[in-house]
Image: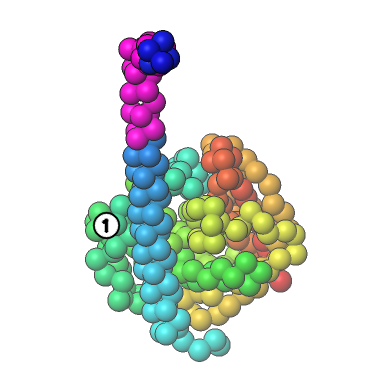
């Protein structure tokens, strides 16, 4: 009996105790880190949902007040992170005035001014958003507006001859331009302009480019009305380009 007790005492060595302590520490640290990551994810989704609400509020204002229906980009804004995996600051998605209509210049909390110039509707993926247009075309302004809604990047005005280029975030969910990469040739995109006129555009090409490639913004459309949708790939390394022409 004494031999057994001595053997058990000798088995629990200081080294084993140290390893157990390390194991406990790593275990609780892992639990803590998981909780932090889950909290950050929930917070990010909360802010994204708030951004969605702001965007849909602008969309509602635009729809309620529309009348009855009767070159290469100069700056390198494609480098803007269109998938934005970091948390969206609440202030960025909370413009100081969202009650104004499409004719009203609105201002984000960062001080960037913008107007609503159109709405975009893609029935296949159940996408409906206002399209915003900033005043300075700076990268910082574009980043701020992209947290609210898809934004004009470059080119012609909505439903006019030329290439109307629109950028939007890919959040890898159902919001903003997340489902745009699933579109195929022949799918329809509808643009409603400030006059309340809605044109249908049929997709004729989709491809990927590096962020620095701005050739998709060319205004050489042979006198046709075109739109270009721009978002990022799921790994954020490339940009998805969707080209469509008025039908």
Q: Residue at x 62, y 50 (%)?
A: 241
Q: Point out residue 144 in the picture as x, y percentages from the top left corner.
A: 35, 53
Taking depth in this image into account, of 89 and 225 the one nearest to the observer is 89
Task: Please tell me whether residue 17 belongs to the stretch shown in magenta.
Answer: yes
Q: Point out residue 186 in the picture as x, y percentages from the top left corner.
A: 75, 64
In magenta, the rendered stretch is 6-29
Instruction: Specify the quadrant that holds the N terminus.
Output: top left
Residue 35: name its quadrant. top left
Q: Relative to residue 212, is residue 108 drawn left or right?
A: left
Q: Is residue 186 above or below residue 14?
A: below
Give the residue at mark 1: 91
Q: Relative to residue 218, is residue 87 drawn left or right?
A: left
Taking depth in this image into account, of 112 and 17 the one nearest to the observer is 17
Q: Main secondary structure of the magenta part?
A: helix
Q: Is residue 75 above or below residue 159?
A: above
Residue 90: name its quadrant. bottom left
């Amino acid at each position: 009996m004494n031999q057994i007790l001595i053997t058990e005492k000798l088995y629990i060595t200081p080294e084993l105790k140290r390893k157990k302590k390390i194991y406990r520490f790593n275990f609780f640290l892992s639990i803590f880190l998981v909780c932090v990551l889950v909290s950050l994810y929930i917070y990010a989704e909360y802010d994204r949902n708030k951004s969605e609400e702001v965007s849909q509020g602008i969309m509602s204002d635009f729809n309620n007040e529309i009348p009855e229906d009767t070159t290469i980009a100069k700056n390198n804004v494609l480098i803007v992170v269109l998938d934005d995996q970091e948390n969206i600051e609440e202030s960025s998605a909370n413009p100081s005035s969202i009650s104004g209509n499409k004719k009203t210049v609105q201002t984000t909390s960062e001080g960037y001014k913008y107007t609503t110039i159109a709405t975009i509707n893609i029935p296949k993926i159940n996408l409906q958003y206002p399209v915003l247009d900033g005043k300075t075309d700076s990268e910082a302004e574009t980043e701020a507006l992209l947290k609210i809604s898809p934004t004009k990047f470059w080119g012609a005005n909505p439903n006019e001859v030329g290439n109307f280029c629109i950028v939007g975030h890919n959040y890898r969910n159902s919001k903003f331009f997340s489902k745009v990469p699933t579109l195929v040739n022949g799918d329809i995109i509808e643009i409603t302009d400030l006059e309340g006129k809605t044109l249908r555009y049929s997709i004729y090409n989709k491809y990927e480019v590096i962020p620095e490639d701005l050739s998709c913004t060319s205004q050489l459309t042979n006198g046709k009305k075109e739109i270009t949708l721009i978002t990022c790939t799921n790994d954020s390394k490339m940009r998805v380009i969707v080209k469509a022409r008025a039908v």
